[in-house]
Amino acid sequence: MENSFRYKMQHVGDIIVGYFDKGCGTVKSRTLGVTITYQIHELNKKRQKLCTKIGDRLVEVKKTSPEETVFEDEKLMKLFAKLKELDDRIEARKKEREDRLYSGELSSEET
């Protein structure tokens, strides 16, 4: 009875919404993957700029007081702390992307 033409016509909206939900889930998943990759690229750009700032500060410290050790400079230590935090964020995003990429392969191999 459920396969009859009448039943299908009465529930055509439900069928369309079901297909729409499946399609949107796939699009949402793909979009999230692209967004994560974009964020990784942006974080790498910030890291490059920060490394340039660290290099500039190192040159400045060595010019102004060559006898001072690099690790006594407060500004430099703050820049290194920011670099460490940025590296941790990059690694977390890369791990998230890896998990998203390879979780689909595992589930398709199991079936």
Image (spheres, rainbow, N blue to C red):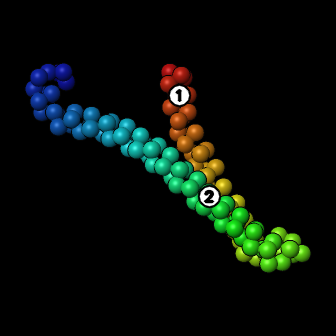
Marker disc for residue 12: none
Residue 7 x %, y %: 14, 28
Q: Which residue is mark 1?
A: 105
Q: Horizontally, is 85 left or right of 40 in the view?
A: right
Picture quadrant of residue 29:
top left
Q: Is residue 81 visible?
A: no
Residue in the image at 18% along x and 21% along y: 3
Give the residue type that dot 1 points to.
Answer: Glu
How would you rate the neighbour count of disc 2 (Cα within 10 Å): few for under 14, some for 14-19, many for 20 or more? some
Residue in the image at 53% along x and 22% along y: 109
Up/down of 76 relative to 38, above or below:
below
Up/down of 51 relative to 109, above or below:
below
Q: Is residue 12 visible?
A: yes
Picture quadrant of residue 68:
bottom right
Of the numbered discs 1 and 2, the one sitting upstream in the chain is 2
Give the residue type that dot 2 points to.
Answer: Arg
Q: Secondary structure at mark 1?
A: helix
